[in-house]
Amino acid sequence: MDKYTFIDLFAGCGGLSEGFMSSGHFTSLAHVEWEMPMVDSLRHRLVKKWGYTELEAMKDVIHFDIQKTEELLNGDWSEETLQLYGSSNASITCKRGLRGKIGDSSVDLIIGGPPCQAYSIHGRAQDKNGMNDDYRNYLFESFVKIVNAFKPKLFVFENVPGMLSAHPGGIKVTKRIYEAFTSIGYVIRKPEELDKCIFNAVDYQVPQERKRVILIGIPQNSKLNLDEIYSSIDGCSTKGVIKTVRDALGNFPPLYPLPHPQKYGRKNISHTANSDPNYTQHEARYLSIRDIGVYRRWVNEKLNHISHQEKIDFYFNVTGHKTLYAKYKSLEWDKPSQTVVAHLCKDGHMFIHPDASQARSITIREAATLMTFPLDFDFIGTNAMCYRMIGNAVPVLFAQGIANGIAKVLS
């Protein structure tokens, strides 16, 4: 059976694509991503797992700023853009653009999720302006333009539930999105119905509580039915079968604190090394003696369950700094993880390992496993960037469930 084709926008390191391709029903025509570590990781994955040549992967994953949508679509890239890439990118599509890359191929789906930080409730609370001026609020417009250019049978637009209450410029973003897709002849659920589009990755064998809005769009004259598509995606869930942190991380090699932190060259080491080659990118991030003690105490005393004010007081007593938010949280063996977030690139205080004797935060590989990335999926970049790309990704098994649900309806 021929596979359905897709273009992945805001592709990141490829969690959504990995899920769609691993379902066995879909193949990619192109990915578009701006941040180079994500581009490198996705190209590497296409070669390692999906049989692409290096040149094919270069052509498939287009390193481009999607805000320059017309330039992306039509080619003839500006001198400024070419200078940004340099010769290493090979400027594969510079003369023909995405239209030339796709050619006469039929585009069945467009999938993707614009960066979600501007829709995050926590992010808006932290910003005095409520992120009203954040350009990321309007990146959906580029998604709409590309849907309009290729007229797919269906699109999948993934984002955080905070999107439903975001109102940059005083207008609800859901109203803007609804009107934008309506104007190009596509049907999505109405703004007041979008709470029915929230899915939880934990229902798709992902060991993590992670709620996301999944907007499905179809042409106004389509024979497809939105309710049938959503019902099919829901039918591919495994509700009642919950994967826990223990299921995901229980067999990982332990990494214990050293009696005294050590220095190797310019690198500080606070924990034992991982000796199992089957678990790559599984190294503990450096912790001070103080933080090792804090993490151990947090798990041993089950401080996840104290009151919010007690958590704030705890942080002040430890650091001498005031905060309005809880700063520490540990995973619990027999529960799914809390939502894995990009903030892991800064510190792991909210992702303390559930084994007190290890007294550390989760590793890159553990974070990836909580997102159901396969163990052989390589993340390319600095440790901070690897944490960020994982936190911003779509869990692979969640994406696979969406793909399976859509494929059932398309077939």
Image (cartoon, grey):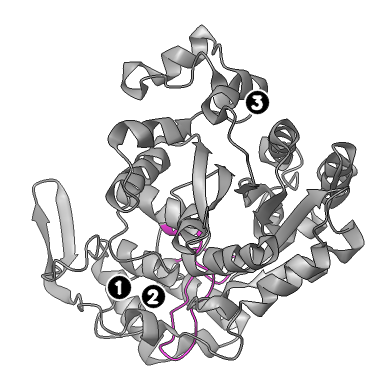
Report if the CB atoms under discs 2 and 1 are less than 8 Å apart.
yes
Neighbour class for label 3 at 10 Å: few (<14), some, many (≥20)? some
Q: Amino acid at mark 1?
A: Arg
- Give the CA distance from mark 3 to mark 2: 41 Å
Q: Report which residue position mark 1 lands on.
A: 360
| Magenta span includes 14 | no
Report if the CB atoms under discs 1 and 3 are less than 8 Å apart.
no
Checking the image for residue 352, the label placed there is 2
Q: Earlier in the sequence, mark 3 or mark 2?
A: 3
Q: Nearer the viewer, residue 180 or 309?
A: 180
Decide if residue 302 is in sight here: yes
Secondary structure, mark 3, is: helix
Q: Is residue 238 left or right of residue 230?
A: left
Furthest residue toward front: 1
Q: Report which residue position mark 3 lands on.
A: 69
Report if the CB atoms under discs 3 and 2 are less than 8 Å apart.
no
Q: Amino acid at mark 3?
A: Thr
Q: Earlier in the sequence, mark 2 or mark 1?
A: 2
The magenta-colored residue range is 320-344
Decide if residue 343 is in sight here: no
